[in-house]
Image (spheres, rainbow, N blue to C red):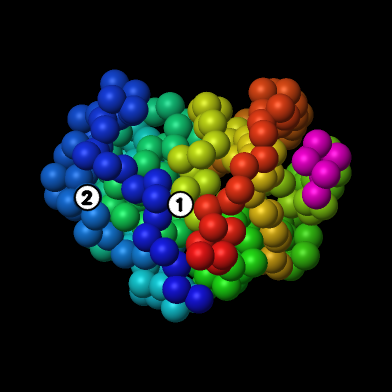
Amino acid sequence: MMLARSESMVAGVEYDRLEPVERGAAKAFLAAHPPGAGTPLAVVIPAYNEAPTVAEVIAEIPSSAAGLQTEVIVVVDGAKDATVARATEAGALVCDVPINRGQGAALRLGYWLARARGAEVIATIDADGQYDANEIARVVEPIRDGQADFVSGSRRLGNELTTDVIRHAGVIVFGALISVLVRHRVTDPACGLRAMRSEVTAAVKLEQPQYQASELMISAALHGYRLSEVPTTMRDRGIHATATKKGGNFGYGLRFARAAVHTWRRDRTAARKPLRSEKIQNS
């Protein structure tokens, strides 16, 4: 199935939709990498002080996935180390934001840049090397085949090589919570390896600065987009990876739950509209 050109591509590059701190970085990015000149698949990587691992992650990303040519967009979120240099040397398109705001904010900007570049599908992967970039095709295929609009990887359906028992239990608990909220079985609500039609990122409301995984999944489901999960691998953090930026397990769980419930309350009355993907298939 050939994907139609995304209707959510930024027309005229409306910088006023961005936060003031992002505008200069976005303008510099699009001056170097012009709007509309991108590939069908954009892989967005948020990065904050990930100099030890970001180049290796970029090198693992295939030049095409599920038959779609890829480009890598790294949004560096106020890093104080050599993340910008390492990502640029590795061949990524880099947007350097001067202030650290959180992974959710970095991803939100990355989605905007990918749409501006004309991406039809957007995938994400973390910069710390915990996910296998060769599995990007696995999350993109259901979208390419018209079977889903948002696809998340799942360590519970695939392989979990991490050793944190508390985090493992949290995945099960919060997967059950989100399954109830969206009335769709979710086994892994916090996987950083995912893919979606680019229009999804424009249609849903994204405001979480850090704990954005649950917000994106819940909002997409409540707006009527078709969710799916595929088996993926979650590696243990390597010896060169920087420490997690999300704090201890208890605090992380509390903030994750708060973001999930807030998103559900905010979006639960969203009316289901005919999906753009359905219009394309029926035309």
For the residues labelled 2 and 1, say whether their Cβ atoms are less than 8 Å apart. no
Residue at 85% in and 40% down: 180
Q: Relative to residue 213, is residue 101 depicted above or below? A: above
- Numbered disc 2: secondary structure: loop
Which badge, 2 or 1, comes first in the chain's sequence?
2
Q: Amino acid at mark 2?
A: Pro
173 with respect to 7 (left or right): right
113 with respect to 141 (left or right): left
* Circle 1 residue: 198
Residue placed furthest toward the left: 31
Q: Is residue 187 visible?
A: yes
Residue at 50% in and 35% down: 104
x and y percentages locating residue 84 in the rendered image: 27, 46
61 with respect to 246 (left or right): left
Badge 1 crowding class, 10 Å Cα cut-off, few under 14, some 14 to 19, many 20 or more, is: many
Residue placed furthest toward the front: 283
230 with respect to 101 (left or right): right
x and y percentages locating residue 2 in the rendered image: 45, 73
- Numbered disc 1: secondary structure: helix
Secondary structure of the magenta portion, mostly? helix
Which of the two residues, 120 or 65, is positioned nearer the viewer here?
120
> Magenta segment, which residues?
178-184
Badge 2 crowding class, 10 Å Cα cut-off, few under 14, some 14 to 19, many 20 or more, is: many
Q: Relative to residue 60, is residue 53 depicted above or below? A: above
* Circle 2 residue: 35
Residue at 20% in and 30% down: 24
Instruction: Tell me the quarter of the picture where residue 160 sits.
Output: bottom right
Is 247 covered by the magenta stretch? no
Q: Amino acid at mark 1?
A: Ser
Q: Give the Cα distance between marks 2 and 1.
A: 15 Å
